[in-house]
Amino acid sequence: MSVTDTRTTSHVVGRVEDVPLGEGRAFVAGGVQVAVFRLRDGSLHATQAACPHAGGPLADGQTDADLLVCPLHLYTYRWTDGSSPSGGTGVRVYPVHEQDGVLVVEVC
Amino acid sequence: MTVLGGRPEGMTSLHFGLDDVDGVDPRQRLVVVGNGMAGARVVEEVLERGGGELFAITVFGEEPHGNYNRIMLSHVLAGEEHEDDIVLNSHDWYADNGVTLRAGVRVDRIDTHAKLVHAADGTTVPYDQLVIATGSRSFVPPMTGLHVAEDQLLPGVFGFRTIDDTRAMLAAAATHRQAVVVGGGLLGLEAARALQGHGLHVEVVHAGTHLMNQQLDLDGGAILRRSVESLGIAVHLATRTTEVVGPDRVRGVVLADGRTIDADLLVIAAGIRPVTEVALMSGLEVERGIVVDDQLRTDDPDVYAVGECAQHRGELYGLVAPVWEQARVLADVLTGTDPTAEYHGSRTATKLKVAGVDVATMGVNRPERDTDEFLVISEPRRGVHLSVVIRDDQLIGATLLGDTRKVAFLTQAFDRGTPLPEERIRLLVDLSDGAEEVGVAELPGESQVCNCNGVSKQAICDTVAGGCTSLGGVMDATRAGKGCGSCKSLVKQIVEWAADGDVLEDPTASWYVPGIPLAKPELTAAIRQQQLRSVSAVFAALAPGGQEDAKSKMGMTSLLRTIWGSEYEQENDAKFINDRVHANIQRDGTFSVVPQMKGGVTTPAQLRRIAEVAEKYEVPMVKVTGGQRIDLLGVRKEDLPAMWDDLGMASGYAYGKSFRTVKTCVGSEFCRFGLDDSTRLGIDLEERFQGIESPAKIKMAVVGCPRNCAEAYVKDVGVVAVGGGRWELYIGGAAGATVRKGDLLATVDSPAAVIELTGRFLQYYRENANWLERTYDFVPRVGLEKIKQVLLEDSEGIVLHLDEGMQRSIDAYTDPWGQDGKTPATPGQFRTALPLVDLPKVPVR
């Protein structure tokens, strides 16, 4: 249920196999840098590319089914809504899906 | 503007309280005006008493942010804390607890007859019970030229009260050079010190006769002044700032005595005044603050006030501890947990650090009656000034400046009226007759342990009694130690004392990694038995629910490599970024490249190649490391493979939890004191153990005589030539955050014996140490005697096994630069992770 009226645009950023299983890779989607992750359960997630804490490269982070860990200071973020379990600023998450073998990211 | 403790941009959430659904909410409406530390604390205390069932709670906050720790703003200004780290309650917290937060909405007035809150945005909210916690604002003394319009300060002038003030000052500090701080109290001095840390020239103008005159007497203030001035901060006392020189922005100030000071930044920290407008507009009784009774009730029976805006028995409180006490009493009253709860005022004791100087004060700071005893120890040269005031054998005041070691005992004596030593000087100094300092056992229950979050010893003991016996658990439950952190060791001592013999070990503490509930020996056995060769296989087989855990992956990768050697199944996602790209990640997302330089010995050809590579790739900084190697810093990830190729050198493993380097001195080949060939042995050790992964990094050194020029006594493994072909082997040394001289494991008579024994020790450490446990913790934990028995006398019959295990890892070694440089291990292994950021951002030297 969203009360915002924002239009999103879809961008093909690469092929699914460009993101190795369990890792993240960064792309530019419509002028926005995003980090796309393919978890070992096959699910896809996308977040802003730079950590809100100190600008760390989130695509270089480690992941599990619930969390993304920034490599610089180990700040964590939830996949569900980008929030930080420690209560700090969260990351922005973007919808991402696979379509005919390519990765499609929606940014506003 | 970023909302502190806010939600990420673009996220919305709608909260439907029960009251939105056709008026069936049976709960009373509790409205809190003010979302600072007092207001939010009241809400927390109410919720803790089951108030979520009793009340539909609405909180108004004038600032758009969540609730944050205002005490820590000076740390944010100093750059010691990130603003995200001072968030106490984020917007999410309010949503999660069903509290409606009206952030960024000011309240104009309260209609106490209709029981309606009128907000500045035109909305009204009805209440049954109302709490005013509007806090205070900076007092701005009258000065000509200070304002450009009503309520608008001249550009370059700042208050120091909110995160927005702090952000604005931080931004200004980056582009301005000369600051004047008006006010020489605690806040002014903290602002001065923080701004000076940003490189500004700072002068403090203080109307009082001495600094911190609220807390210190004249002599103490004079000593503090010397300490502050020795930091390079100029201090002007007993004069006011009468005029601000403009007109477009701050150019300087004029003092009452006619002097002028140039300044392009002016900070007003001349004290605070309670914010009482809402109460005044609402017809409540206001003197200096909003007048409340012992139940924090105003003259309207359903309206309460707490915190800095409240005036109780004629007192206003500006410290956090009394505010916490008030919040607890008010929550007891509101929720009916204790309808007779009363607040009787606080005896304020405070301990803080101002401009780098420790200060603790309590009660009065000078004698008031002829019969009062007054003891002063003053050491101006050391910046120490200590005094106590005693009346009728009771401590009624103490001031400690520059040395606060006795604060625990004095606080106890002040709070509890405990008997004082006959020799009064013992109150201030420890006379060396073996008398013990007061331990945690003797601390009274009420004594405050954590000043930031107002946690008493009793609260910690109660939490332990409630079944929470790990330090982390107690800290999470009470928030003790979660402010500035300076009390953490005291919290730990109290938890240990309170848990007594009944310590329920934190189960995760014995696990090798947090995500798998097994200690290292059991985990290793299970991995071998089930033939688990990849990290994902380990999670699937051994983790609860087969769930992987991000923070366990790096430790698991290390363990599997130790167990399986070349038979380990590599999974790049289980590695930390450093191990994925064989370089050390830097603050801007670039990497550092350290080629192997065995024993710290290099050649002109190597240096030439390094120089050429550094120029070709425009390396921002080339630095000689502490480990006798050369570090190329600020390298883009995508340049790594080509650089390795051009260097033609092996990786120095400066990024891994692994064997790093062997430092050497020039030994007998060159040094006129050298007893043996330390350089050769260092090179041989590095050759043999290069790249060996381990629970934590391993640093070594070999020196050719006990003069110890390469610091072998403070290495994980240190080797010292003692003459006659003999070598001493030290283990468990450290010279980082911990400094420890290594323990002598053995004296052996050949380089080959050094290499053999080193390998055995390393393998024993690899198989038995916890993840990230350095040898300086491991050796004392296991015990030197035990290690000697196992390694030298083979008391457990495992020496052969250790030798084989080490040999397997040595055989599995491949240079990672040579390995991944040509063909990436995974697609895009070396692609940039910040495609729109122009790296490096680190400065180029």
Image: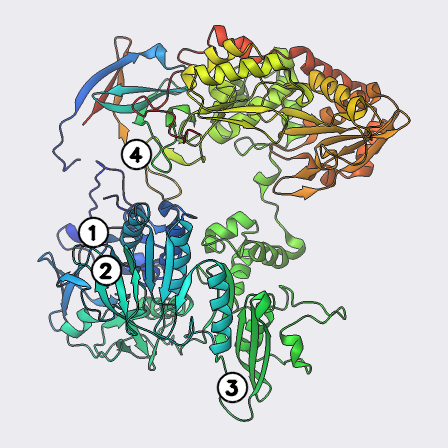
Amino acid type indicated by mark 2? Arg
Name the mark nearer the viewer: 4 or 2.
4
Name the mark nearer the viewer: 3 or 2.
3
Q: CA distance from mark 1 to mark 4?
A: 24 Å
Q: CA distance from mark 3 to mark 2?
A: 53 Å
Say which element carries label 4: loop
Residue B44: x %, y % from top left: 35, 58
Name the mark nearer the viewer: 3 or 4.
3
In this figure, which residue is indicated by the disc labeled 2?
A: B27
In the image, what residue occupies the spot 45% across and 63% down? B454
In the image, what residue occupies the spot 52% across and 17% down? B611
| Residue B114 location, quadrant | bottom left
Question: What chain is tagged by disc 1?
Answer: B
Mark 3–mark 4 CB contact (< 8 Å): no
Say which element carries label 2: loop
Is B94 in front, or is B268? B268
In this figure, which residue is indicated by the disc labeled 1?
A: B18
Q: CA distance from mark 3 to mark 4?
A: 60 Å
In this figure, which residue is indicated by the disc labeled 3?
A: B367
Amino acid type indicated by mark 1? Leu
Name the mark nearer the viewer: 1 or 4.
4
